[in-house]
Amino acid sequence: MGLVEDFQEHANKAKTLPPSTKDADKLILYGLYKQAMVGNVNTDRPGMLSPTDRAKWDAWKAVEDQRTSND
């Protein structure tokens, strides 16, 4: 199995995390997924009235500029 297939397999597994998974852990996975799929943050930070979107944006921003060893 190649790197892309491994990534997709694990990304799909992340969609079925147990209900006991902490929100902080989900945000870490979200940030890493967005960084892998999109790259650096390319949107403005959501406002205070969108706390969920803001937390997701912050998680993505936290891993900005991280690159794989293949870059």
Image: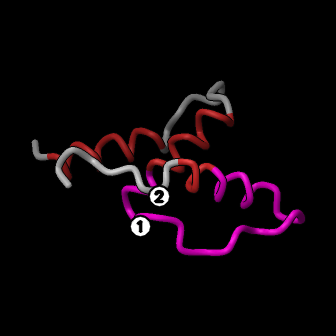
- The quadrant in which the C terminus is found is bottom left
Q: Which residues are magenta?
A: 33-58
Task: Give the SS element for disc 1.
Answer: loop
Q: Nearer the viewer, residue 37 or 17?
A: 37
Q: Is residue 54 left or right of residue 48?
A: left
Residue 44 belongs to magenta span: yes
Q: Residue at 68% of width from left, 36% of height from top?
A: 23
> In the rendered structure, which amino acid carries the disc numbered 2?
Lys
Which residue was labeled with disc 2? 34
Which residue was labeled with disc 1? 38
Number of residues whose C-alpha sits closer than 10 Å to that of mark 2, classed few (under 14), some (14–19) or many (20 or more): some
Q: Nearer the viewer, residue 34 or 17?
A: 34
Residue 59 percent across, percent down from the top left:
61, 49
On screen, 2 above or below 46? Answer: above
> In the rendered structure, which amino acid carries the disc numbered 1?
Val
Residue 47 percent across, percent down from the top left:
83, 68
On screen, 27 above or below 47? Answer: above
Q: Is residue 50 left or right of residue 1?
A: right
Q: Are marks 2 and 1 in contact (CB under 8 Å)?
A: yes
Residue 43 percent across, percent down from the top left:
60, 75
Q: Residue at 59% of width from left, 39% of height from top?
A: 26
**The quadrant where residue 1 appears:** top left
Q: CA distance from mark 2 to mark 1?
A: 6 Å
